[in-house]
Image (cartoon, grey):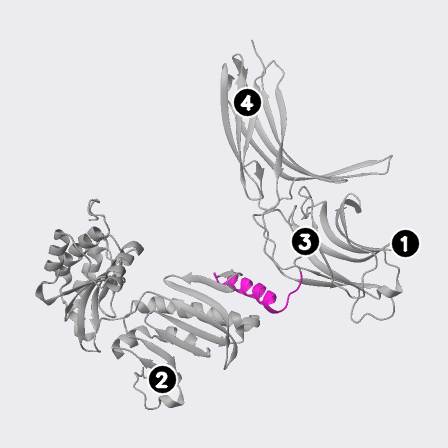
Amino acid sequence: MRRQPEVEIRFLPQFVRPGDVLEVDARFFSKSPTPVDEIVLTLRGVEVSRWSDGKTHTRQEHHWVGLETRFLPERLDTGEHRYRARFPFPGRVPPSYQGVALSVQYTLDVKVDIPWWPDVDKQYAVTVMPPPAAAQASPWVFRSHEGEARGTDLYAECALSQVAVSPGGVLRGQLSLGNVSHHRVRAVTVSFVARETTYRPYARQHELARYTARVFEGSPGDQHALPFALRLAPDAPCSFAATLGHLEWALEVAVQHTLTERQLLSIPLTVLPLVGAEASVTSTPAVGKARRAQLWHGVGQRHGLVYDPEADTLFGSLDTVSIKVRAEMSAAEGPMTVATLGWAPLGLDLALRPGRWADVFAARHRLGVAAFDRAFLLRGRELAQLTGFLSPAVWEPLLSLDEVQVDDDGAKLSLRGAGIDEAALERFVVALRQFAAAVDRGRAQIAAPAALREAEAPWRAWARARGGRFEAGRVFVHGLGGTVSPCRAGHLWRDAETVDETVVVFEVDEALSEKLRLSSDVTGEPLRLDDESAAMLTRLRQGGARVELSAQGVAWSRPGATPEPEGLDEVVDTLNRLVRRLSGQASAAPFR
């Protein structure tokens, strides 16, 4: 016997936004075999404007969406039958809305055509949300008058942190009244007001909602600041503009007299959909540190840096270069904005700073570029290495700065007064990013020192084999893999032409560092080692090598250079086992 199937519809996502794809999961539960000509799923989006004078009723429609999917199952056997459909929403459609004379509704119509039997014809509401948008922190000042306020008329000024707010969000600001003494003010109110406007078939406006708060009872002082925080209802409709009408919001400032109320300001607002946490902003246009915090936050956002208000610091990174910017007070120069940049060691013995008149006879390197040689004092191991690293892209951003200190591990760069001027701070941050990007590229151009030029290829190969990072400046390898703690190996230089020694250094954790410190600094006695650890030390010290156990780590060294690093594998592995035993990890599984 034929029977209408039961229908269950599920939407994904539950709330759709413009540009989304609505996935419909349609399930039909048939209690008996039923022939079916077709199943039709139709998505409709209709904007309707209505007008009535009590006798005449007028309605106008605009269709935003009309999509259809058909299925031809021929028959629904007993049990569950599942069909899926995808409906792409246009990128610009108004949200779902039900007002006084204007509405926007989206529905899914489900029709099951059963021959010689009543069809299934159901309709389901689809909720379309406005596109997400984050409120921008931008202070605004509004006045009830133009130019200078004259005479005795009551006037108002209102400062807002922003002119956009989310449903359920809080709008903060402060206002002041002038010429209060000439008017009997009993209270001051601030209101959120929503107004619906239709264009067709007739132009009409309706007040849809009003949320009012009293910010002051009685008569406020003349030009006295009145702070307020007004929360919008969580279910407040969002601003939108459609074909037949629109919904707009305003913030109204009014004063109440003994028997009357007078509106002084109507400030246009935008109500945005709620997207995550609201922007952290001050309540009004700020000065001093508060204004600088807003300024730094905005500049940081534009350039990929994060502002930490507690530390009053901008920080971030560009590839392998870390960046921190903060304000400091210089006894000689006054307020300074100082950037500290850090990077992995370059190994050049680099020292770069602005030149001074007293440096005329100072030992220095010259790049042979007039602009650079006039501006900076340069020191380092070899000019050839420095030239490879110091391309114009590295040093040209530094010419506009007031203080420059650059070495192997990072830089300290400063600019006078940039912390309180947006344009100057913007230029400073741009220069920092250009410099950081150039440092990252320049590292790859550093050649090995002339004394170890032939050793560069085998040391690079060894770094790759051991999973480490090769530093060409000193012929050094950082982050050797397969070790119980961070390990590095390479050369320490006595001067530009002479290698002092080859070292392998293991960093130790806090517990072992304390153990090694106590053995040397407190008791004055060497650390007691078990027989196997002592035997390891003996092997490591062969050939004139030294092994030092200290709170800073475990270090092996021998005089001179090591052109072929393969022989250091045994040293690294033996030191690794020694550190494991000293740390109480002798029974742990091997790291390689």
Residue 128 found in image quarter = top right
Q: Any mark on residue 38, and which?
A: 4
Element on which disc 2 rests? helix
Q: Distance between the residues labelled 1 and 4?
A: 70 Å
The residue under label 1 is: 258
Amino acid type for the residue under numbered disc 3? Leu
> Which region is colored magenta?
284-305
Q: Which of marks 4 and 2 is in front?
A: 2
Amino acid type for the residue under numbered disc 4? Glu
Element on which disc 4 rests? strand
From the viewer's side, name the closer residue of 192 and 118.
Answer: 192
Amino acid type for the residue under numbered disc 1? Thr
Q: Distance between the residues labelled 3 and 2?
A: 55 Å
Residue found at the very far left of the displayed protein: 543
**Looking at the image, residue 572 lies above or below residue 44:** below
Q: Quadrant of the N terminus?
A: top right
Where residue 364 appears, as percent x and y from the top left, is 30, 84
Element on which disc 3 rests? strand
**Which residue is at a point 49% across and 64% down the rendered structure image?**
314
Where residue 149 appears, as percent x and y from the top left, is 81, 70
Dot placed on the residue nearer the N-terminal end, 3 or 2: 3
Q: Nearer the viewer, mark 2 or mark 1?
A: 1
Residue found at the very far top of the displayed protein: 1
Q: Any mark on residue 373, and which?
A: 2
Mark 4 Cα-neighbour bin, 10 Å: few <14, some 14–19, many ≥20: some
Residue 553 found in image quarter = bottom left
Amino acid type for the residue under numbered disc 2? Asp
Q: Is residue 557 left or right of residue 515?
A: left
Q: Nearer the viewer, mark 3 or mark 1?
A: 1
Element on which disc 1 rests? loop
Dot placed on the residue nearer the N-terminal end, 1 or 4: 4
